[in-house]
Image (cartoon, grey):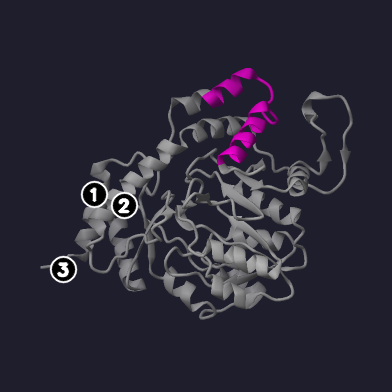
């Protein structure tokens, strides 16, 4: 469908075009280039972690993280209110996903429910930070993991730049993954990265990323020396053009987030007085970067009715997320059924993500809010 107002638009300028063009014009180091090392150093510096490793997607980044932490044969607690990759990566790493409830404020894992689901087989907890907002129970989840001597691995795919006070998301986890898919705060088209303070995990992820090959600082494509392979790995590398784009995007992250928050503030003002809508809610010291803007409706009927109304007017919206435990794959694999996670299922029936992007014009904001108002205005 040709949307009058899409759900998102990618934030870019001519410096992005030039960064990618420069690598192309160089005619070499398209697969393994100096921009990748530079990008990883700057990502680690931005998040104040010791190491960063880039990957060709957030999914491959999370998969590699779980493999590096050797979770095979264990149970991993994950939310059901998430993109399916969070759970799929657990399965791909040879572990069992155990779904837990989310809380009603920031839509992230509920620490109390997580604590009740920990068993002797539990190896890690993987919370998400929904839509650019830090998880409400971030610190509590860290404490739960410490108390039970298990890993906290953040799926921070949507939240680069968000923070609780001065603590950035991605800094609480033993390792933390971020996505750089096209709708994220910074983007390389497709891409992801992991940050960690563990040299051991960093070295493992580098092996997993590139066929299990020991490179010892050498570029595979620029040497005649044969290299050793010490484990089975994947081709999960981020292309150099993507790293160059990422460097350019990272330079603009402050302006990107400022614009997102400005649009969100305008949406808040125009929508907060509508009876039946709850705008994004979070604790006062939380810094939300608004990768998404999600409203909550009273029930499924009103949510679906509003989405149909917006669609008929050319305004895109999406339901993020339908419960993963109710997808056919996990119904079959884990025996999950409706009613197993009542809080998550209730939230999933009432949320609707509406358009937000850094370059969103006031006329577009007004149009989206006007259509929402018209849906809730009694017909005469």
Circles 2 and 1 in contact, beta carbons < 8 Å: yes
In the rendered structure, find residue 315 and report the number of the disc placed on it.
2
When the figure is inspected, residue 356 is found, relative to residue 18, above or below; the finding is below
Q: Which residue is under mark 1?
A: 367
Q: Sequence-wise, which precedes: disc 3 or disc 1?
A: 1
- Provide the residue span drawn in magenta: 19-46
Residue located 57% across and 43% down the image: 47
Front position in the image: 6 or 321: 321
**Residue 41 on the magenta span:** yes
Is residue 146 shown left or right of residue 313? right
Circles 3 and 1 in contact, beta carbons < 8 Å: no
Circles 2 and 3 in contact, beta carbons < 8 Å: no
Q: Sequence-wise, which precedes: disc 2 or disc 1?
A: 2
Q: What's the distance in space between the residues labelled 3 and 1, CA to CA? A: 19 Å
Is residue 132 shown left or right of residue 275? right
Front position in the image: 324 or 187: 187
Answer yes or no: is residue 2 visible: no
Q: Which residue is under mark 3?
A: 378
- Which residue is farthest left? 380
Could you tell me which secondary element the residue under label 2 belongs to? loop
Q: What's the distance in space between the residues labelled 2 and 3, CA to CA? A: 21 Å
Residue located 54% across and 59% down the image: 128
Q: Give the image location of residue 39, x and y in percent.
A: 61, 33
Residue located 78% across and 48% down the image: 200
Front position in the image: 6 or 45: 45
Please rate how many residues cluster around mark 2, counting C-alpha atoms within 10 Å: few if below 14, some from 14 to 19, many from 20.
Answer: many
- Which residue is farthest top? 26
Q: Give the image location of residue 313, x and y in percent.
A: 27, 53
Prevalent SS, magenta region: helix
* Quarter of the rendering containing residue 152: bottom right
Could you tell me which secondary element the residue under label 3 belongs to? loop
**Residue 270 on the magenta span:** no
């Amino acid at each position: 469908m040709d949307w009058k107002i899409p759900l998102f638009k990618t934030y870019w300028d001519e410096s992005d075009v030039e960064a990618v063009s420069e690598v192309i014009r160089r005619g070499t180091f398209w697969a393994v280039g100096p921009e990748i090392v530079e990008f990883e150093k700057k990502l680690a510096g931005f998040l104040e972690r010791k190491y960063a490793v880039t990957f060709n997607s957030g999914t491959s980044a999370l998969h590699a993280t779980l493999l590096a932490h050797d979770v095979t044969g264990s149970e991993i607690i994950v939310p059901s209110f998430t993109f399916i990759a969070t759970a799929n990566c657990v399965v791909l790493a040879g572990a069992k996903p155990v779904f837990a409830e989310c809380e009603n404020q920031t839509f992230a894992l509920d620490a109390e429910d997580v604590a009740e689901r920990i068993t002797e087989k539990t190896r890690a907890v993987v919370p998400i930070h929904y839509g650019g907002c830090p998880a409400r129970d971030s610190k509590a989840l860290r404490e739960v993991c410490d108390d039970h001597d298990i890993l906290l691995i953040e799926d921070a795919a949507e939240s680069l730049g968000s923070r609780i006070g001065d603590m950035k998301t991605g800094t609480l986890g033993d390792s933390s993954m971020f996505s750089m898919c096209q709708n994220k705060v910074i983007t390389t088209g497709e891409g992801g990265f992991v940050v960690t303070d563990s040299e051991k995990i960093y070295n493992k992820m580098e092996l997993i990323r590139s066929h299990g090959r020991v490179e010892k600082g050498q570029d595979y494509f620029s040497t005649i020396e044969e290299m050793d392979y010490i484990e089975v790995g994947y081709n999960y590398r981020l292309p150099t053009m993507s790293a160059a784009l990422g460097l350019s995007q990272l330079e603009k992250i402050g302006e990107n987030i400022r614009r997102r928050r400005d649009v969100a503030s305008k949406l808040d003002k125009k929508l907060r007085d509508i009876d039946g809508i709850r705008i994004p809610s979070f604790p006062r010291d939380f810094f939300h970067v608004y990768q998404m803007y999600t409203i909550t409706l009273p029930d499924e009927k009103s949510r679906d009715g509003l989405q149909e109304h917006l669609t008929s007017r050319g305004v895109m919206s999406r339901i993020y997320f339908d419960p993963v435990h109710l997808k056919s794959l996990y119904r079959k694999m884990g025996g999950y059924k409706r009613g197993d996670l009542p809080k998550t299922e209730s939230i999933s029936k009432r949320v609707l993500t509406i358009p937000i992007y850094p370059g969103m014009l006031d006329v577009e904001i007004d149009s989206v809010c006007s259509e929402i108002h018209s849906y809730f205005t009694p017909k005469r």
